[in-house]
Image: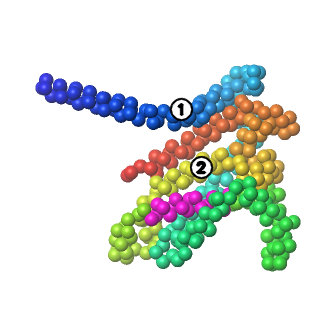
């Protein structure tokens, strides 16, 4: 009995020594990355949480507790602008999930089909918009969606009904901007889905063929379950990127989310409040901007953590 206890103690000491030795070995390599991560990621995040409890700027900051959050949630016009931007951002995200990611799965399934010819060419075509600057594509689409520029051309094609102010109409502006964003970034989820589908063993498909499964059944019962981790990761990336979207609205509309705040997102609201300052005063409110960033951080956590647990498990 004493010998067994002695062996257990020795094993624990060896385990601790091995872990400590491994840490000492890898620490010099991890230290630079850890330093820059703390300096440029962790510390600004913590400081933003602290700043959300203050008002004013520079040396005139005063502690106000949760007053900034109260303004955003209940005090006009702050609450009107915040809830409007939050709803628009959520709609923007859902458009990307339903259009960008669903089409990405469809295109990836077609591109990985054995009978598909010219798959490399189509992959290139789908990925080309990703390589272009958002400001460039946004401005070009802004011209194409302007009836003054595109109207005569559409009339020649007998598509004059499409010549309308898509970006000037509150009912179509946000949808138009979201679809342009989907068009530009659809190449990334498509390529990720292609890689995931090509990583599936051919044995599954051969067994399905022997069992007489059709293409629809193969997709729903073999392909989709096996690429579930990739689907979850792409959904998370889409969620995070959309709640930080700014450049596409800036390029196609403006930082005020024209027309009449119809395309205002969390990113543009944060820029106006925390950096540029709201019209007409134009004085930035860093504390209020930090409160917007803090709320967004917790919203992202509420969306990311459950998605990770549901899609990245090995069960």
Element at badge 1? Answer: helix
Using the rendered view, name the quadrant where residue 61 is placed.
top right
Q: Nearer the viewer, residue 28 or 249?
A: 28
In the image, residue 306 sits, relative to residue 100, either above or below, namely: above
In the image, residue 143 sits, relative to residue 22, either above or below, namely: below
Quarter the N terminus occupies: top left
Residue 280 visible in the shown view: yes
For the residues labelled 2 and 1, the Cα–Cα distance comes to 28 Å
Q: Which mark is residue 35?
A: 1
Please give the name of the residue rendered at 75% of the width and 48% of the height, measured from the top-left corner.
264
At which x and y percent is residue 121? Answer: 58, 71
Would residue 265 appear left or right of 103 to someone viewing this image? right
Would residue 141 appear left or right of 280 to someone viewing this image? left
Find out whether residue 21 is within the magenta segment: no
Q: Nearer the viewer, residue 185 or 89?
A: 185
Label 2 neighbour load within 10 Å: few <14, some 14-19, many 20+? many
Q: Which mark is residue 239?
A: 2
First to last magenta residue range: 181-198
At which x and y percent is residue 102? Answer: 57, 62
């Amino acid at each position: 009995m004493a010998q067994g206890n002695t062996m257990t103690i020795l094993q624990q000491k060896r385990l601790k020594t091995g872990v400590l030795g491994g840490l000492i070995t890898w620490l010099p390599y991890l230290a630079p990355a850890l330093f820059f991560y703390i300096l440029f990621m962790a510390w600004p995040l913590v400081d933003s949480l602290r700043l959300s409890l203050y008002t004013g700027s520079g040396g005139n900051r005063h502690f106000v507790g949760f007053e900034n959050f109260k303004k955003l949630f209940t005090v006009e016009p702050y609450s009107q602008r915040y809830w409007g931007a939050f709803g628009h951002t959520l709609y923007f995200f859902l458009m990307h999930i339903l259009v960008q990611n669903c089409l990405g799965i469809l295109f990836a399934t077609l591109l990985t089909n054995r009978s598909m010819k010219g798959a490399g060419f189509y992959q290139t075509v789908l990925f080309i918009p990703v390589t272009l600057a958002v400001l460039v594509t946004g401005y070009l689409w802004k011209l194409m969606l302007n009836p003054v520029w595109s109207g005569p051309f559409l009339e020649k094609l007998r598509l004059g009904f499409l010549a309308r102010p898509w970006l000037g109409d509150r009912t179509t502006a946000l949808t138009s901007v979201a679809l342009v964003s989907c068009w530009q970034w659809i190449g990334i989820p498509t390529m990720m889905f292609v890689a995931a589908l090509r990583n599936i063993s051919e044995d599954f498909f051969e067994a399905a063929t022997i069992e007489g499964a059709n293409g629809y059944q193969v997709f729903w019962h073999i392909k989709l379950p096996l690429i579930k981790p990739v689907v979850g990761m792409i959904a998370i990336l889409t969620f995070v990127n959309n709640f930080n979207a700014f450049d596409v609205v800036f390029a196609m509309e403006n930082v005020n989310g024209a027309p009449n705040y119809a395309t205002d997102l969390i990113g543009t609201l944060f820029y106006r409040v925390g950096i540029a300052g709201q019209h007409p005063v134009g004085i930035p409110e860093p504390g209020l901007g930090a409160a917007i960033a803090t709320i967004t951080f917790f919203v992202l956590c509420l969306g990311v953590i459950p998605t990770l647990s549901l899609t990245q498990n090995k069960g």
